[in-house]
Amino acid sequence: MLSAIQRLGGAMFTPVLLFPFVGILIGLSIVLKNPVFVGDLADKEGLYYQVLKIIEEGGWTIFRNMALLFAIGLPIGLAKTAHARAVMVVLVSYLTFNYFVNAMGGFWGEFFGVDFSQAIGGTSGLTEVAGIKTLDTGIFGAIIISSLITWIHNRTFEKTLPAYLGIFQGASFVAMLSFFAMIPAAWLTLYIWPSIQQGILSLQTFMLESGSFGVWLYTFLERILIPTGLHHFIYTPFVFGNIATPNGITADWFMNLESFTQSSTAIKDLFPAGGFALHGNSKVFGCVGIAMAMYATAKTENRKKVAALLIPATLTAMLVGITEPLEFTFLFIAPWLFAIHALLAGTMAMMMYSFGVVGNMGGGLIEFVTGNWIPLLGNHTSMVVTQILIGLAFTLIYFVTFKFLIEKFDVQIAGRGDADLKLHTKDDFNKKHGITGKGGHAVNPLQVQAAETLDGLGGTENIVELSNCATRLRVTVADPSKVASREFFMNTGAVNVVTNGQAVQVIIGLNVPQLREECEKIVAVHRGEKQAKREEDADIAPNPAI
């Protein structure tokens, strides 16, 4: 069950990867249309303003279609085979679901307690998905429906039908079953969701009224659940769902950013829900302190090698908000140290919120600068300065705390133990695998790493399921005893490996989607060869129609 939930959490991250670019685009567009920065160029009748407005409108594409994006993003991570066809069927079925909701709500809205004659938005509980007026289930509904359809796909896509029904095989069969599954799904949604909406409104009130403690608890949970992969279920409903604001913190922040920049009222008063998107501060300020402490406590002769490990991992955390490459260097050596990290992260967010800092700051420094700091300069410069000062103070707190604890308890992190700190150059890698460049064979390092990773997982025959999240390869294996040691995976280029029964997570880094694709190619080739061998042994001629 944990493995399944982790795969779902990882799949949820697939569409999230699209948000940084459009967030930067919208943030810059808003800044460049602000008369505080560009003066008379911000004239709405001028070509300059109109071109920027057109660009900004294009940037809103993702934010205005988040439910649809999450629906089609999940099968990319959860479908076992034929991912493209799974995405197509999910798209069609999710739209069908919303048409059913629209029709049932129009006919029987009084029975369900939903008035479909109201305009969308506000307190009506209605929204629009791809032009369809429907119940506003946000990303929750999209994720549930998409998961259901993907489950049907995984169970039925490869089912063989009689020859006279061959036209309905594969994706068509999945679409047929999903069509009929959407009818009760729509009815149940209309019957249940209005009560859930009331619960969400109550939760919004509770979280906002809990103030600084609510911010601390939210941020602490977001960090402490990273090892389990369940942290996506903490921040996603707040940042992209309608838990804290009607359209999610990210969307509503950008929708109102232009008015925020022109108002002299404190941002905390204008957008109090922004306290639940401060978890990026531990990535920007906290990870730097952790890295400095790890470098300072390493043996003198190992510091150059440790720096080579820490600098890219820290920059990844600081700039784009992906922290696993750094955190997993110490997480499984000293889990209690990671708990300290989570406590400090929650405390930093709480302190910032207490001093009036709010915003859309779940990512890294790029998001901070383009979507928060630059737009808010002018009327809200003091808030930006306050955030930076508190952040730098916590960088120092992180450094002192981690340095003391590492030395006090002699934590054997990279560069402190007696084992050789293995950092191979590109030449070492090529030499090891016989890759000689121009005159050699066309094997790239990613292909080699994929082959080695599969070897470490017990070979292709030991692979049951394969998926990934932002930085981790998530695998279900048939026999956990065949999985190699942590050292084996680290020598292949991984940061670490986590095993929990048949569920295995190999921490790779930001190139994990490409590595997964290479692994899937190898698995597909191996299984194809195995199937061909079975047919040959059984003296069965292949079907030319396949």
Image: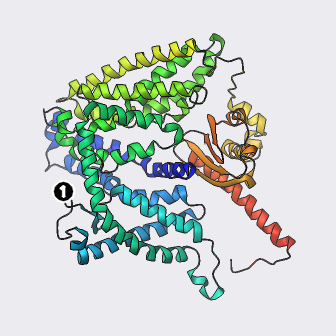
In this picture, is 461 found above or below 90? above
Nearer-the-camera pick, 49 or 187: 187
Q: In this view, does 75 lie to the left or right of 139?
A: right
- Could you tell me which residue is drawn at 43 percent across and 70 percent down? 93
Residue 264: x, y in percent?
13, 32
Q: Quadrant of residue 234?
A: top left
- Quadrant location, the C terminus: bottom right
Write down the residue under mark 1: 122
- Could you tell me which residue is drawn at 48 percent across and 68 percent down? 88
How many labels, in total? 1
Q: What element carries label 1?
A: loop
Residue 325: x, y in percent?
55, 33
Dot 1 amino acid type:
Gly
In this picture, is 135 found above or below 270? below
Q: How crowded is mark 1: few (under 14 residues within 10 Å), some or many (20 or more)?
A: few
- Could you tell me which residue is drawn at 61 percent across and 26 percent down? 333
Nearer-the-camera pick, 530 or 189: 189
In this picture, is 145 found above or below 324? below
Residue 204: x, y in percent?
26, 45
- Could you tell me which residue is drawn at 46 percent across and 66 percent down? 90
Nearer-the-camera pick, 48 or 14: 14
